[in-house]
Amino acid sequence: MSLIDVFFRKKRSAVVAKERLSIILAHERAQRSGKDFISALKEELIAVICKYTAVDKDALQVTLDRRDSIDVLKVDVVLPEGGLRRG
Amino acid sequence: MTKVVVVTSGKGGVGKTTTSASFATGLAKRGRKTAVIDFDIGLRNLDLILGCERRVVYDFVNVIQGDAKLSQALVRDKHSENLSILAASQTKDKESLKEDGVKAVLDELKDMGFEFIICDSPAGIESGALMALRFADEALVVTNPEVSAVRDADRMLGLIEAKSMRAEQGLDRVKEHLVITRYAPQRADKGEMLAHTDVAELLSLSILGLIPESEQVLDCSNQGLPVILANGSPVALAYDDMVARFLGEDRPLRFIQPESAPLWKRLFGG
C-alpha cells in the first residue's frame, strides 16, 4: 500500500472479499450442521417477549456472527416508550 | 503407527497435486517411508508431476479389483528412495473406488511399514473425493486466497467432519491443516488479495503451509520434478517449512512481507 493510497483510500477489494466470505460461510455452516435454528429461535423469542411485554415484533433482531473462532449470537430488542410491562 | 493424510480442496486447480507431490517427497527426504496415492480416477496426474509416468504398469483400481498385487503397482520414486507412488487408473470410472477395496489397500500399506500414506484427492465432492478423505487421520486443506477456493475449502471441512470414518465412529476428529498456495504478499499488502491471516481466520484453521506464487511451479511440473526439490527457490523453501511443521518443528511463516520496493514506489504505488 503506498502513501498516496493511505490519503486517497480506495475501497480495497480484499476487505470486500472477507466480508462476503464471512457472511456466506456462516450461513453455509449453519445449514450443514443442521443448526439453521436462527429463524426458529427468532420466532420463539418473539413469542416469549411478546408474552410479557408490549414489544413490537419488528423491533426484535436476531443475528449469528462468527468472529475468529467464536460464534456470537446477538439479540437486539428495541423497547417501546413507556416501559416494558404490558398494559 | 501409520498416518493417513488427505490432501484436499474442493475446488480444482488450487495445487492439490503439486502439494501432495512436494509433501510426500519432503517426508521421504526426511527418511520417512511414505506412499502417495492418486485418487483422481480417470484423470491421473500425480505420476506426471512426480515424473514417473512411464514406469506406471498397474494402478490403484487394478489392485482394488485384484488384477495386480499392491507390490506390483507401487512405483518407486526416482528422486527419493523412501517414496512409493500408486497411480490412479486412467481408464476406469470413479465408481471403481469401493470403500472396502480402498481400506484393504490402506491396510496393506500399513502392514508394509509405511509411516505416511498421502491421499491426493480429486477436485469436487463426488465419490473419489469422499473416498480420499474417508480414512484420513489428518487433512491438508489447500486453498488460494480467492473467494471461491476459500468457500469450497470450508465446504470440504464440513465433509471431513461429516463423512470421515473418524467422525462417523466418534473417534478423535481428523486434524485439519491449512495450506495456502499462490500467495502474493505484495498484492495482499495492497489489499487486492485476502491476507493469509484472513484466510486462516475465515476457515478457523492454523496455517501449515504458505506457498508463494511462483513461475517455478510450472517450470518444475514441465520436467516432472516435485517443486520442493527446486533447491533454494521460495516455493521449495515454503514446502520444506510445511513438511517441517507437519513433523512438529517450529518454523515461523515467511514470504508474508512484500519485497521492499524503492522509495518512489512506496510513495506513489505501482
Image: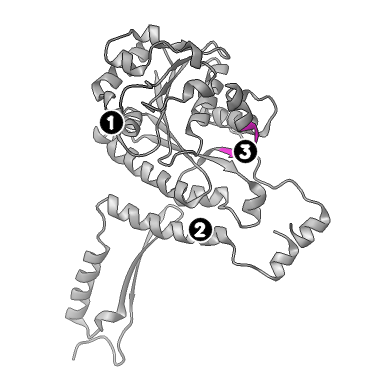
Give me the C-alpha separation between circle 1 and circle 2.
Answer: 34 Å
For the record, the magenta segment spans: B210-217
Q: Residues within 10 Å of mark 2 (few under 14, many from 20)?
A: some
Chain to which the residue tagged by mark 1 belongs: B
Up-down relation of residue B68 to residue B189 (above or below): above
Q: Amino acid at mark 3?
A: Pro
Q: Tag 1's secondary structure?
A: helix
Up-down relation of residue B51 to residue A87 (above or below): above
Earlier residue among tags 1 and 3: 1
Which quadrant would the C terminus of chain A be assigned to in this image?
A: bottom left
Please name the residue that numbered disc 1 is placed on.
B165
In terms of image quadrants, where is residue A41? bottom left
Tell me which residue sits at (56%, 47%) in the image: B196
Q: Are marks 1 and 3 in contact (CB under 8 Å)?
A: no
> Which x, y percent locates residue B163?
28, 37
Q: Residues within 10 Å of mark 3 (few under 14, many from 20)?
A: few
Between B203 and A83, the one lying in front of the other is: B203
Give the mark toward the camera: 1 or 2: 2
Q: Which mark is residue A17?
A: 2
Please name the residue that numbered disc 3 is placed on.
B252
